[in-house]
Image (tube, rainbow, N blue to C red):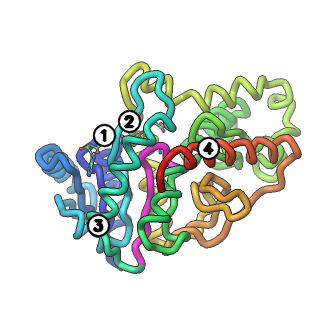
Amino acid sequence: MPAKVAIIGGGGSVGATAAYAILLRKCASEIVLVDLDEAKCKAQVLDLSDAAFLSDTTIRFGTPKEAGQCDIVVITAGAKQRPGETRVDLIDRNKSILESVINSMKPFKKETVLLLVSNPVDVLTFIAQKLSGLPESQVLGSGTFLDSVRLRVELADVLNVAETAVHAYVLGEHGDSQFVAWSAASVGNTPLLNFPAIQKLNRDELANKVKNKAYAIIEAKGATYFGIGAVTALICEAIILDLRHVRPLSHFIPELGVCLSIPAVLGARGVHQTLKPPLTKDEEALLQQSAAEMKKAINKINL
Ligand SMILES: NC(=O)C1=CN([C@@H]2O[C@H](COP(=O)(O)OP(=O)(O)OC[C@H]3O[C@@H](n4cnc5c(N)ncnc54)[C@H](O)[C@@H]3O)[C@@H](O)[C@H]2O)C=CC1
Ligand SMILES: CC(=O)C(=O)O
């Protein structure tokens, strides 16, 4: 089935890197890049077209209205953190950008899946669910998928196993109130906490390293884009191929009243099911605290 992916903000670092990763995965038939900065976006298309010989995917510049008719719309438009800024600090700037991009794309094709990547991704996912008119299950955010990848790499290194054998998730906000669900993590079938190397490990220190990785990269080079580009491509692939992968994605959690990341089944047309792992009392409290932070951020804006 041909699948069209639009990237709003495709002129920027995250949008263009996501396009590159999607191109290399060969999961889409066409990528449409859209950006307010038309000249830069067209230059990204030209540059990416030089790599298109590695793929069967075509790439072109497009309009917001064309994007609204694509199968997946990835939103990477917006301001990025300056060194020292939190993701939530971007809310005022990125809320108005999101409102304007959603209005410019409407009405969406009824099957369109909207994938939020711009920060603060959980709050923007919540706003996009309200504004887009699409079913909640079709509006999701990349959430803590990236943080969980960062965690898995660290744990695989400690245990000297393949990353794919590590089933461990960062849950909650893609931001400062995130936490690791240590009690639910495993390597193969063995609970992670059974490993002597993990019992000896300073787990708080490792969780903070994961949480602060983006800050460290932004401090040194101004932005992160390779990791999120790869994560975006895998999310698009799972939707296009209806792969039913389980990923920690930002989606609406009715009992919390906000969007944040809990593992979810991802396939055609978005989120199929939430798979909340059993959590300890302390981890449950951290989830509630993360939801409270999201509510605080949402209450500060006019919706
Ligand atoms: N969710 C995640 O894990 C990650 C999220 N991000 C977020 O992604 C966003 C983009 O970051 P970068 O690509 O590095 O920034 P960038 O500045 O390189 O690109 C942003 C692009 O958005 C475009 N834009 C602004 N307003 C627009 C509008 N109304 N319509 C269409 N395009 C518009 C700009 O022209 C620019 O090309 C930021 O909010 C950043 O925090 C970045 C990395 C990881
Ligand atoms: C910038 C950002 O959200 C990240 O790299 O995690």
Q: Are marks 2 and 1 in contact (CB under 8 Å)?
A: yes
Ligand 1 is located in which of the four quadrants? top left
The three-letter amino acid code for the residue at tag 4 is: Lys
Q: Are marks 3 and 1 in contact (CB under 8 Å)?
A: no
Per the model, the C-alpha gap separating discs 4 and 2 is 21 Å
Q: Quadrant of residue 109?
A: bottom left
Q: Which mark is residue 207?
A: none
Mark 2 sits on what residue? Answer: 80
The three-letter amino acid code for the residue at tag 2 is: Lys
Residue 123 visible within the image:
yes
Mark 3 sits on what residue? Answer: 105
* First along the sequence among labels 4 and 2: 2
Mark 1 within 8 Å of ligand 1, using the beta carbon = yes
Residue stretch rendered in magenta on the structure: 111-121
Mark 1 sits on what residue? Answer: 13
The three-letter amino acid code for the residue at tag 1 is: Ser
> At 48% across and 68% down in the image, what residue appears?
239
Mark 4 sits on what residue? Answer: 296
Report the mark closest to the observer, 1 or 4: 4
Camera-side residue of 173 and 144: 173
* First along the sequence among labels 2 and 1: 1
Mark 2 within 8 Å of ligand 1, using the beta carbon = yes
Instruction: Kindly state the secondary structure of the residue where label 3 is placed.
Output: helix
